[in-house]
Image (cartoon, rainbow, N blue to C red):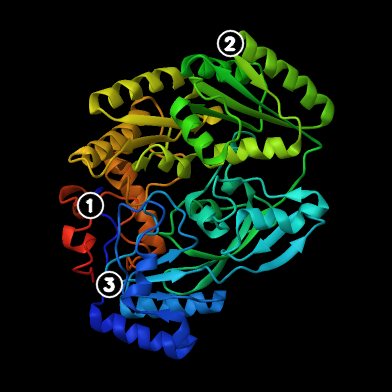
Amino acid sequence: MTAVTATREVLGGPAATEALAARLRTALGSGRVITDLTRLRTYECDGITGYRVVPALVVLPESTEEVALVVAACAEAGVPFVARGAGTGLSGGALPVAGGAVISLARMRRVLEIDLENQRMTVEPGVTNADISKAVAARNLYFAPDPSSQTVCTIGGNIAENSGGAHCLKYGFTTNHVHAMTLVLPDGSVVTVGGNGVEQVGPDLRGAVIGSEGTLAIATSITVRLLRTPEAVRTLVADFPSADTAAEAVSRIIAAGIIPAAVEMLDALAIEACEAAVHAGYSLGTAAALVVELDGPEASCAEDFARVEQICRDAGTTHIRVPGSPAERTLIWKGRKAAFAAMGRISPDYYVQDGVIPRTRLSEVLDRIRQMAEEADLRVANVFHAGDGNLHPLVLYDAAVPGESERGEHLSTAIAELCVEMGGSITGEHGVGTDKACSMPAMFGDDDLAVMLRLRAAFDPAGVCNPGKIFPTPRLCGERPGRYRPHPLEAAGLIDRG
């Protein structure tokens, strides 16, 4: 197998999918197998809407046993399948396969067990991040990973992408908070990986599956780690005259030995969008703002917070805002977490990028992004997890202007590959999926990709589990069709896509 050959797509053809749909209707009931074109359109893309494929059928299982039944039936029929959660992913990881099935886990929303003594909870994949924390909030426990979409994104999707969020600087990503998983393998067999602790003896199959973007197995039961609610939480917003001075403040905070729970940065465009959408009280007109949050024991938290304030002043802050109430703090975070959706207030279209760089190169990378944006004659809004160097540049464009969409896509890809050039990665938490598969060779050599494909083939030798994702293929890269753009007759409602 060559380095650029992805796991092959096995398509059984229309007859196979029709027979599969009939078989699953008999097993699960007709209400849980969707083949109507209008309803299938709901599942044609995830949060990155530029790539769209209508699946042949969608199945709605409600238990591990039913997921195993569906997967086994797909494998026997040679029909590829894609597991889907809430559809909030931003890399095209849940993009359906033409002629294939989507296995929606949206109905698997039960909390299976709460073990307060050992600070663990076992849930189904359709439970949201926020609901995990809500279930144990009265016992002063919570689930640390907090993607911006935490009120709607599900733990199953977090497993697929190894999601992080604003507080991953101190608390880590999903993989640091999952003890065990029940998995349905691509042949329909059911296994359990992991155990009572995050670290286990032997091969780390739990770690291999987390972040594999749904290409190795489907997690149907997840045991997560719960943390004690911190005794104290302190938050500030510091304005800076430039992104460079804000980046310098970030470096100084970390160099001082302080590990905040979160350090977020927004530039002027991001602030403009957030304020238009949420009115969180960010300073319009400031070049950059840092949101810094510390938590822990009251005494140490207060001491470190005073040091952070002084570091921000020394780095040139023009204004420091400390929320005076929990409600004000919540509003600050609401503004930050609304940043992606808020871009619609200042641009008709935008591409979301996700890359990682060394913290020490923040200023250099931001300068390069500015230069690249000017050359492309486009605007880029920057909002990112500054503490761990996870950038989220948003390339703004207008699809109605000829050539802008193509320039925006090219710039977005160039920014991701710039991150690799600077010693980083093409993705920090959104995944590779469909969107960045063609950039994988910028980060990995032929031998690296070959080893990854061998691992994938060990789990899925038939190539039916979320094919076409992560790895570059001739279909994606040699004959790349680009993002979906409706035909003018379709836009006018005169024709339909089948």
**Residue 150, numbered label:** none
How far is disc 1 from disc 3 in space, using C-alphas? Answer: 17 Å
Task: Tell me which corner region of the image, top left, top right, bottom left or bottom right, holds residue 257.
Answer: top right
State the residue position of label 1: 476
Q: Secondary structure at mark 3?
A: loop
Task: Tell me which corner region of the image, top left, top right, bottom left or bottom right, holds residue 186.
Answer: bottom left
How far is disc 1 from disc 2 in space, using C-alphas? Answer: 45 Å
- Mark 1 vs mark 2: which is more N-terminal? 2
Relative to 120, is 192 above or below?
A: below
State the residue position of label 3: 99
Q: Secondary structure at mark 2?
A: loop
Residue at 42% x, 73% y: name it.
187
Residue at 46% x, 39% y: name it.
428
Q: Give 13 or 496, whichever is nearer the viewer.
A: 496
Instruction: Name the amino acid type tagged 2.
Output: Ala
Residue at 19% x, 69% y: name it.
495
**Residue 315, numbered label:** 2
